[in-house]
Image (tube, helix red, strand yellow):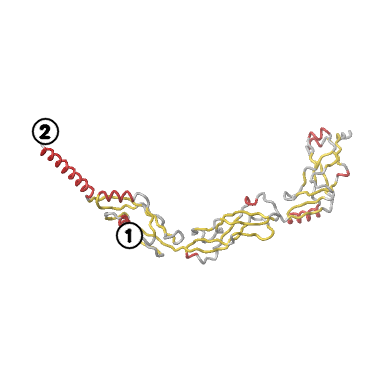
Amino acid sequence: MNGRDPSMRDQILNFVGVTLVALLIWIWAAGETRETQTAFVELNFTGPTNDSMRISPKELPPIRIYLRGPRRALEDAIDRLRKPITMIAGTLGVPSDAGSHELNLTTIGQNLIDDMGLPVSVMGSDPTNATISIEPLTTVTVAVDPVLPKGVRTSGRIEVNPETATIVVPASLANSDDLRLDARLSAADLEGRQTGRRHELEIPLSLPAGSTASDSIVKINPRTVEVRLTLDANETELALSTPVPVQIAGPPSELESMLVEIDPDDAFLRNVVLRGPAETIERLQANNAASGGIIAFVHLTSDDLLKRISEKSVTLWNLPSDVTVVSVGDDSTAFPLIGLSIKDRPAPPKN
């Protein structure tokens, strides 16, 4: 030490050592000083399994709890309580029996702290109590019914796979008469699908409208089923026994000055075959027999009249929208050519 007295060096080292020890003791004492602090905790409730019970409310508003203990332990406790805590029924003072229960939130808070293993006491809480209701749940197997849009017809059996599903509901509803599930097909599900063919569709399951369990359903398994069906248009054909007259349509002002005549051989269309839904065809057959109301039209444009065309196809039939023309005569066409004669209409004789 460059000639310095060894005893002086020892004194300095002893002083430094004593100071460090005193500092550590002070730091430790500061951490162990008992204080009171406030924390907020959010509690969520659940059953031992997801399908075992329903607890209402499922969560409580933030609870203020008053903690007392060493500063370090308090800081640890407050940090752990920042995140919502899930309380499992049957543990930490939360009951698991069915019915309404009043919870002492101070006791619940102390149980939480004790479970953390921290030397902290819960001195009180705000609010002091909270009420929860516990309702046992049960799993029920129910039938699945396919439900079709109004007016859709099928042929053969509609298959549903699987034919049953399970639902989780409050035990009080286990014997309800309207516990079933619908595989409800929409018009969009069937749009554009060919009739006469087997179709497979994946359809979600739902409770029927108005079911008493609609607000109590907890779980449906599986969520979807496969529905297999064959669409049946229920269509039929009708061969008209009477000829169908052909008429001319066009701009009224121009037809007044033109004389348009239909070739006599084309004035009536024979052996006309129609196709459509059976009910529509039956009504059409009855109406046509009574009034002969089916007519084919040839629509002439101004250009057609100007050019004096000699033939043009039928462009319109006065038929229901769901009825089509299958054939006319021996041709599979709904638009047969009609022979025409277009002339200027003679001027009326002068008086």
Which residue is at a point 43% across and 63% down the rendered structure image? Answer: 135
In the picture, measured across the screen, residue 43 lies left or right of residue 316, that is left
In the picture, measured across the screen, residue 244 lies left or right of residue 116, that is right
Residue 163 is situated, as x and y percent measured from the top left of the image, at 59, 61
Q: Is 100 placed above or below 349 here?
A: below
Q: Residue 335 shows which numbered tag?
A: none
Q: Is 50 placed above or below 297 here?
A: below
Which residue is under mark 1? 104
Mark 1 or mark 2, earlier in chain: 2
Q: Residue 123 lies in what quarter of the image?
A: bottom left
- Nearest to viewer (mark 1 / mark 2): 2
Which residue is under mark 2? 3
- Check disc 2 and report its element: helix, strand or loop: loop
Q: Residues within 10 Å of mark 2 (few under 14, many from 20)?
A: few
Who is closer to the viewer here, 38 or 115? Answer: 115
Q: Residue type at mark 2?
A: Gly
Q: Quadrant of the C terminus?
A: top right
Q: Residue 2 lies in what quarter of the image?
A: top left
Q: Quadrant of the N terminus?
A: top left
Residue 60 is situated, as x and y percent measured from the top left of the image, at 38, 54
Q: Which residue lies furthest to the bottom in this view?
A: 175
Q: Is 108 placed above or below 254 here?
A: below
Q: Residue 197 lies in what quarter of the image?
A: bottom right
Labelled pair 1, 2 in contact (Cβ < 8 Å)? no
Q: Is 170 placed above or below 324 here?
A: below
In the picture, measured across the screen, residue 268 lies left or right of residue 112, that is right
- Check disc 1 and report its element: helix, strand or loop: strand
Residue 89 is situated, as x and y percent measured from the top left of the image, at 39, 60
Q: Residue type at mark 1?
A: Asn
Residue 254 is situated, as x and y percent measured from the top left of the image, at 80, 35
